[in-house]
Image (cartoon, helix red, strand yellow):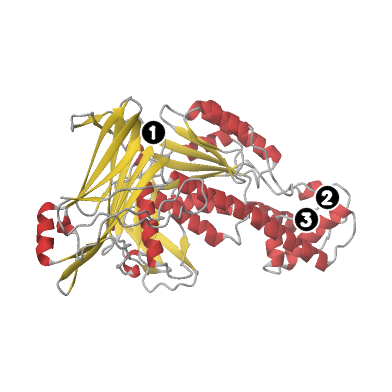
Amino acid sequence: MWTWLARVLPYTNSDISKRKTTLPLFFIPFAVGFWVIPPQPILAQQTEEISSHEVQPTFKIEAQRNLVTVRVVVRDGKGAAVDDLQKQDFRLFDDRNEQTILHFSLEKPALRPAQALSVREPGTGEESRLPGATPGRFIGLFVDDENTKFADMARARDAAEHFLTTYFQPGDRVGVFTSSGTKRLDFTADLGKARQALLAIRPRLAVEDNECGAMPAYVAYMIHDLDDPSARGVAGNLMSECLGTKQISEPVVRMEAMRVEAQAQAASATALRSLESLIRRMSSLPGQGSIVILSGGFFTETLRHEVDQIADLALRAKVIINSVDARGLYVSPAFADASHRGGAVNDALGLAEIASMLETSARRDSDGMGTLALNTGGVFFENNNDLEAGLRRAAAVPDAYYVLTFSPQNLKFDGAFHPLKLTLVARRGLNVQARKGYFAPSKPDDPSGQEKEEIQQAVFSQDEVRDFPVDLHTQFFKPDHFNAHVGVLSHVDLHQVQFRKEADRNLDNLAFVVAVFDLDGHFLTGQQKALELRLRDATLEKYLRTGITLQSEFDLKPGTYLVRLVVRDAGTGQITSLNRTLEIPY
């Protein structure tokens, strides 16, 4: 459980109260949902100017939500990333209506310097800087054991094992995860453990593709959802070939289509939930994060909205998703293999039409993988037997990409798909990779839930943002060789905090979060504080001169830690987030 003691300095001022509380904002990796901890009693009597009531957001939802993020990778004719474009070089259209680009940034993740260590020696009160020690890359190998056949799984595992031994560099971390949630290995620098985890993975298919009479998921979807007569004919032929009969009744075909679609949708939903959990885990990591999906393809025709939500989550977490089709080179599915068994084939359909539909079904199985890669700036590697080359391409972070955000005007909360089009104004001969669209939300977001989500995302991100001035300092003392007491000082300059005037009071709410991570990005402990400010003019003038300082305290063992501070102004939604890497010597 997280505890904290909020100290607003100077302690003797009668306008300030001290309080103790915890709020259920943090996502604990590998747990379902959030820890919900009831507020603890307030330690000091509230004053009329600074209250310790739980913060309620006062900003308007329209001011901060409904932002759509578009990650763009631009390459020249030789495949090299282009990194000299400006905001005015892009034109962005939402359903053919040009949009105003509110935020534009160029990211060069491969060039990010290692973080330096902030060290405070016992008794000196002085900070020094040491060379960086935090990992540079975190690569999550996501093996889809629910939708990959045994032969494809074996080939993909062999390629991934060899890839691990030849590609990784000192400082990299790799994790092995599965769609079923079994046989997982959290991020580690031990490649031996990673290879063992890979070899332990086995397919968990409910139905093998070569099972007698197996109906492809997309064919089942066309029958059950679209009532397509050609699909019914294909399915009927597959089943009649298997059973050696001349005709399968239409009700039997429809019932089988319903069963197959439900089964495929359940397996795909499981894979997407596991992928979402991995993205949330990676959002807390200090280095560059990317995911490589190894899958034989999973059915997402009825889960496109869920795929879009996962892509949005990855964009916010700054995680790149890449996909490698474990089937390798594939042509028309093996309907011909079934026909060799000597059963009857409906000549009215024609073998060419049947083969074409089954090939389309095979391609549609990889649509979700391709969409996730396209929408997040990743690589989609398909229809190629050199899976190791695909893994090397997928694990490589783009040298540069652009991040654009816009706010759709008059957006309806109807869950409808909005096509996007991104063009370059003057540059020719360049290849632009960006998402093709997004789904509108089905309902407005709850403001309190929005605030929690924004703070959580800021805490588990490692980017520094300075919307308003905040200073962060750490100090510690060691009562013995095995323990240390750490103090974290957060000082806010109120000059850029936007107060709201009401009668003779200046109103605003500030939320403070301090989190401690180890160097592998694991969350260790955290403290949440909230101040509700209702200051008279004279009191505000005083704090404009001095600022406000809060102290959070932790007990830690000797080691190296990343300390993360997030301060959010509820009135404007602005966030400042800072990092300090603290080393406590043994």
**For the residues marked 2 and 1, what is the alpha-carbon distance in whole angstroms?**
54 Å
Can you identify the residue that label 2 sits on? 339
The disc, 2 or 1, on the residue closer to the chain's N-terminal end is 1
Label whose residue precedes the other's in the sequence (1 or 3): 1
Q: Are marks 3 and 2 in contact (CB under 8 Å)?
A: yes
Label 1 neighbour load within 10 Å: few <14, some 14-19, many 20+? many
Please report whichever mark, 3 or 2, sits nearer to the chain's N-terminal start: 2
| For residue 239, side relative to residue 106 (left or right) | right
For disc 3, the marked residue is 351
Q: Amino acid at mark 2?
A: Ser
> Disc 3 vs disc 2: which is toward the camera?
2
Q: Position of residue 237 (x, y in %)?
A: 81, 58
Query: Which type of secondary structure does the marked residue at label 2 adopt?
Result: helix
Circle nearer the viewer, 1 or 3: 1
Residue 104 is left or right of residue 69, and the answer is left
Q: Residue 135 got which mark? A: 1
